[in-house]
């Protein structure tokens, strides 16, 4: 494929996605329509449309008692003075969300393997589920392991293994003679994802990084090296490569596949009509009926790719409910970043992601 052709296709796809982004609010990504291809839907129950309510029974675990929280998410350890952000429960409008029961999860998935695959948001969710389960069986034997991109927590008495495979793009990032190359057509690391009973994928945040924060020098697509390209186009191509991997390698009778929707950031208060603010010092969710910033472009791309997959992939459409949680970030209390409005405190929002995962797995 010639460079001019590639650029013309990229331009066409950019305009196409922009057009459909304006239509994003016209349909629900996890609607009551069971005809959506490539997804499992829970009947007519939409768990992703609802509101946040105060619940004194939350949080689901004590962070000081969980050995699996990465320091950057342990906001109380690093001095966050408030705890109200831990007390909100997601309440769907159309049906109740099942209460998380760690014993039931451990028994149902006794001897099974559950893997989170993605970036630091996957780490966030991996830590959260390990803590949620540990709170139910605090005296149960556990083993933690970490080697290269793979981390694991094993609940020995149940034979349940939780894994995290760190790969920010899902597609390959290789070091070659030309430099660091992001290969949009390649997923060699997918060999490590085989044999799992549950796979939960996530990718987006690193696709937008530029300058010193960009971990690649070139993008490779169709055998061509490019110095850069439209990031939404790159994301679309990379996610399509992942979708092809799912189609080729996943046996739905053995493995359940989930895709975690776009996790929002809260660096710009204009997104919730407070332009002078960021997530810093925010202590309450956004309580409006419609988030002012609307759905992000990346959400539209995810929907388009998932709608083309013929294998069942359950979309954990957490974008809107997470957009409301401008209060739930580490802010200045991560011990790592001076201002963190992209990750989430634990206990906190990722626990809700896992409550939704639990509801889907046990429904």
Image (cartoon, helix red, strand yellow):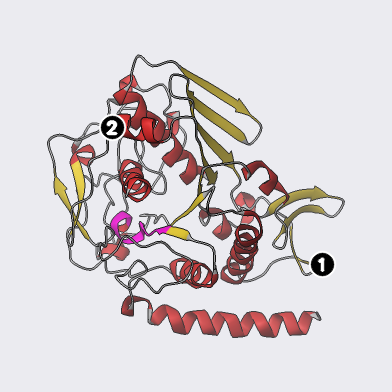
Relative to the observer, which residue lies in front, 175 or 266? 175
On screen, residue 26 above or below 362: below
Q: Residue 315: where, in percent of width, then height?
A: 42, 59
Circle 2 crowding by C-alpha within 10 Å: few under 14, some 14–19, many from 20: some
In the rendered structure, does residue 251 fall within the stretch colored magenta?
A: no
Q: Residue 134: where, in percent of width, then height?
A: 36, 24
Circles 2, 1 touching at the beta carbon (< 8 Å): no
Circle 1 crowding by C-alpha within 10 Å: few under 14, some 14–19, many from 20: few
Q: Which residues are magenta?
A: 315-322
- Is residue 1 rendered to the left or right of residue 277? right
- In which quadrant is the N terminus drawn? bottom right
Q: Residue 22: where, in percent of width, then height?
A: 39, 81
Q: Residue 97: where, in percent of width, then height?
A: 22, 50
Which residue is label 1 attached to? 223
Residue 333 is at least partly visible in this image:
no
Query: Which secondary structure, mark 2?
Result: loop
Going from the N terminus, do you reach mark 2 or mark 1 first?
2
Measure the alpha-carbon separation of dots 2 and 1.
49 Å
Numbered-mark total: 2
Q: Which residue appears at 34% of the width and 38% of the height?
A: 345
Relative to the observer, which residue lies in front, 34 or 75? 34
Marking on residue 292: none
Q: Which residue appears at 17% of the width and 63% of the height?
A: 288
Q: Which residue appears at 63% of the width and 53% of the height?
A: 214
Nearer mark to the viewer, of 2 and 1: 1
On screen, residue 343 above or below 264: above
Residue at the limit of the structure toward the front, as seen here:
253
- Is residue 52 rendered to the left or right of residue 3? left
Which residue is label 2 attached to? 80
Q: Which residue appears at 33% of the width and 18% of the height?
A: 138
Query: Which secondary structure, mark 1?
Result: loop
């Amino acid at each position: 494929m010639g460079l001019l052709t590639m650029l013309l296709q990229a331009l066409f796809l950019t305009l196409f996605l922009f057009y459909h982004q304006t239509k994003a609010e016209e349909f629900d990504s996890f609607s009551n329509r069971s005809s959506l291809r490539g997804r499992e839907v829970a009947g007519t129950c939409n768990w992703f449309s609802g509101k946040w309510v105060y619940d004194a029974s939350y949080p689901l675990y004590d962070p000081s008692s969980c050995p699996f929280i990465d320091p950057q998410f342990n906001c109380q350890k690093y001095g966050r003075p408030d705890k109200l952000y831990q007390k909100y429960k997601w309440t769907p409008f159309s049906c109740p969300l099942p209460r998380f029961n760690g014993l039931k999860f451990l028994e149902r998935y006794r001897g099974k393997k559950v893997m989170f695959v993605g970036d630091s948001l996957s780490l966030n969710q991996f830590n959260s589920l390990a803590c949620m389960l540990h709170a139910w069986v605090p005296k149960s034997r556990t083993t933690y392991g970490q080697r290269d991109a793979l981390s694991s927590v094993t609940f020995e008495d149940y034979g349940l293994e939780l894994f995290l495979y760190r790969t920010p793009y899902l597609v390959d990032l290789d070091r070659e003679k030309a430099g660091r190359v992001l290969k949009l057509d390649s997923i060699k690391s997918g060999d490590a994802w085989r044999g799992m009973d549950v796979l939960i994928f996530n990718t987006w945040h690193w696709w937008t990084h530029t300058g010193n924060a960009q971990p690649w020098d070139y993008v490779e697509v169709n055998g061509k090296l490019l110095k850069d390209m439209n990031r939404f186009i790159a994301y679309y191509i990379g996610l399509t490569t992942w979708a092809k991997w799912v189609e080729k390698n996943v046996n739905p009778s053995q493995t359940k596949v989930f895709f975690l929707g776009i996790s929002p950031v809260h660096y710009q208060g204009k997104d919730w009509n407070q332009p002078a603010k960021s997530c810093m010092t925010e202590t309450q969710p956004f309580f409006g009926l419609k988030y002012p910033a609307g759905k992000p472009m990346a959400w539209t791309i995810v929907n388009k790719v998932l709608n083309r997959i013929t294998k069942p992939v359950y979309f954990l459409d957490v974008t809107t409910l997470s957009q409301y949680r401008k209060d739930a970030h580490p802010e200045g209390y991560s011990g790592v970043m001076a201002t963190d409005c992209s990750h989430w405190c634990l206990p906190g929002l990722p626990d809700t992601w896992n409550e939704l995962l639990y509801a889907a797995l046990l429904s």
